[in-house]
Image: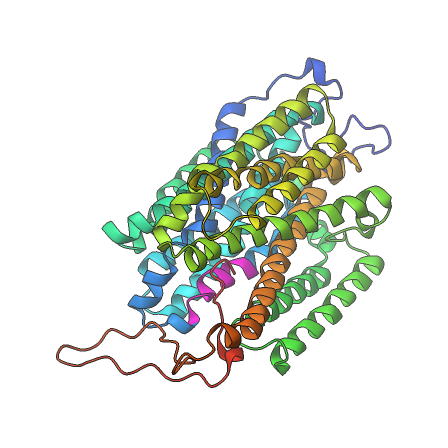
Amino acid sequence: MLPNPNDAENPPDPATEEQPLLPLDPDSWKPPKGFLWIEVAIFANVFLSGFDGTITASTYALISSEFRAANTSSWLTTSYLITSTAFQPLYGRFSDIFGRRTCFFTSTITFLLGCLGCAVARDVIFLNLMRALTGIGGGGLMTMATIINSDMIPFQRRGMYQAAQNVLHGFGSICGASLGGSIANTIGWRWCFLLQVPVSIFALFVGRVVIPRRERPASEEVGLKVSVWKQVDLTGALLLILGLSVQLVGLSLGGNELPWSNIWVITSLVGSVVLLGLFLLVEAKTSAIPVIPLRMLQGVLPVSTQIANICVGMAAYAFLFNLPLFFQVVLLDSASKAGARLVIPSLATPVGGLVSGIIMSRYGKLSYLMRAGAILMFLGNLLVVALQFHDAAWKYFVYVIPANLGQGVVYPAILFTFLAAFGHDDHAVSASTVYLIRSLGTVYGVAITSTIVQNHLARALPGALHGVPNKWKVPPRPPKPSPGTSPPPPPPISNPQDITIQRPYL
């Protein structure tokens, strides 16, 4: 998005002026032409973003079983997470340079092709590659929805639309988590990906019709294309993608497939620090438009908001990962029953987003919402910690609600607090930065809590199994035996450090 022509400090360039969609006076704001259908197009993508983000959590076991690849099953979600997180911040800046319409189409088409590739995959390697392609597009679905709405709706009125967006994303996540297993068990896991293709086609068609394009004189198109590419910070974008990807690979391998002391894990984490350091250096000196301006990472308000953002992301996904683990390992629930326990409490997240949107639109109390949401998450986690093996059945339901409610309240409050710290011209890149930092926080939360659980398991298990014969013979899921043959015996485990807990959410 180019500078707003109504802003006196940023006079428009007549050669590249774009019709603004954000009036200065929010009281006189009228929805632009085709507003409802634009919302339909971007909200379809928002639903897919939530749905696809949780669909593999309930299907990865079936998929890995079919391909006989249980040891690489976690990469179904890891490959998606790596590319979606790494490419997410690029959509903000690239949409400023190439236009919202172009980036909307790029994310939607890439996501569509990735889902189609997953549905027809014949081996696990191709499937993981297609999940990575899906992540490249998926990283822009939620981001582009926020950016497009920021162009059309005044900041003071955007809270309700952001709340609706969060509700739909939460509803998509619930559908993915609850319906994924049912779809896979009835018509096959391939339909979990194939059913997303028509929705993507619908969003693509509607967006093609209603999302406006930049209008420029034809005589200026050639020269403008050359000048646009000169604005792209390709070096910074490449360093950011490599730095984030290497870091996420190290975090995914560490404590999961490799110990944290493994040279590959250490090299990945150290290499990511070096690459991200080079990225910051390039951003400070580049003559092009920086992918993430360093001024967005300076000052008390932006820095404190992003610290809160990363902490909230860590807490939310640590809660999401460990709660099903508690239900299955401690309460001995099946995977389907553990998922069913979370369906109703998860509805508190979109409810919290709706409450947050109403308060923001009417009163604008961003700081109070951030504090209230964080306190609810804190109390909710304390309640879950207080759960016992033998406890009242209602506690397993009620104690889960406050943390989900707080998450729904605090997420939009953090986004709008960070947006309010910068002008409208920076809203695209600032929104993508918020989503990037939050995504990193989710990865850190799962990695840290998984390490804590793993270390406690290795330390406490010998005493708990004292006197049990063959106590280190932990049977893995056996391969499907051929007709007339019996499955091989499980290999012995010589050391409790060898026992690992797979992280499906990574």
- Residue at 68% across, 52% down: 437
Magenta-drawn stretch contains 228: no
- Residue at 60% across, 46% down: 381
- Residue at 66% across, 23% down: 359
Q: Position of residue 388 (x, y in %)?
A: 50, 51
Looking at the rendered image, the quarter that the N terminus falls into is top right
Foreground of the two, 381 or 175: 381
Q: Position of residue 61 (x, y in %)?
A: 36, 62
Please determine whether, in this image, residue 283 is positioned above or below residue 33: below
From the viewer's perspective, is 411 left or right of 110? right
Whether residue 257 is visible, yes or no, is no
Furthest-top residue in this view: 28
Furthest-left residue in this view: 484
Please determine whether, in this image, residue 502 is positioned above or below residue 222: below
Please tell me how many numbered marks the rendered image carries: 0
Please determine whether, in this image, residue 63 is positioned above or below residue 385: below
Please determine whether, in this image, residue 247 is positioned above or below residue 409: below
From the viewer's perspective, is 105 left or right of 192? right
- Residue at 77% across, 29% down: 5
Q: Position of residue 198 (x, y in %)?
A: 35, 42
Magenta-drawn stretch contains 79: yes
Chief SS of the magenta region: helix
Q: Which residues are magenta?
A: 72-82
Foreground of the two, 7 or 43: 43
Q: Position of residue 35 (x, y in %)?
A: 54, 24
Residue 247 falls in image quadrant: bottom right
